[in-house]
Image (tube, rainbow, N blue to C red):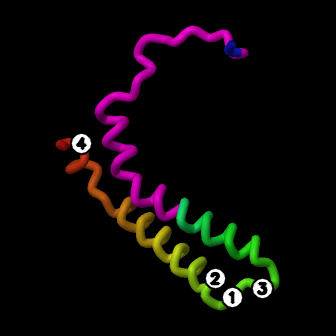
Amino acid sequence: MTIIHLSPVAGDEPTAADLAAIEAEWPLIEADLDLLNAQIAVLNAGPQASALDTRRVRRAERRVLDATRVLANRDPETEDAA
């Protein structure tokens, strides 16, 4: 039984271009998830968080920044040609 009474609309599927855009952003999405997991581990550890835990957060933050920089420096003209 579904509580949402909406019928599927034709054309709701992502296009090849949509999927390519998601694939191009995947390294950033993965880095964000790693950062979130590292932050959760530190929060769960509370006062017992080790230096290694905080180092994992810093390294994950760095991966997010690196992935963001790579994504921002992409040439949109060459992406359209693909």
Report which residue position mark 4 lands on. 80
Mark 4 is surrounded, within 10 Å at the Cα level, by few (under 14), some (14 to 19) or many (20 or more) other residues, namely: few
Q: Is residue 3 above or below residue 72?
A: above
- Foreground mark, 4 or 2, reads 2
Mark 1 is surrounded, within 10 Å at the Cα level, by few (under 14), some (14 to 19) or many (20 or more) other residues, namely: few
Q: Quadrant of residue 52?
A: bottom right
Q: Are marks 3 and 4 in contact (CB under 8 Å)?
A: no
Whole-percent x, y for residue 49 in the image: 73, 84
Q: Is residue 75 above or below residue 13?
A: below
First of labels 3, 4 by sequence position: 3
As drawn, the label of residue 53 is: 2
Identified at 45% across, 20% down, the residue is: 12
Mark 3 is surrounded, within 10 Å at the Cα level, by few (under 14), some (14 to 19) or many (20 or more) other residues, namely: few
Q: Are marks 4 and 2 in contact (CB under 8 Å)?
A: no
Number of labels in the image equals: 4
Report which residue position mark 3 lands on. 48
Q: Are marks 1 and 2 in contact (CB under 8 Å)?
A: yes
Report which residue position mark 1 lands on. 50
First of labels 4, 1 by sequence position: 1
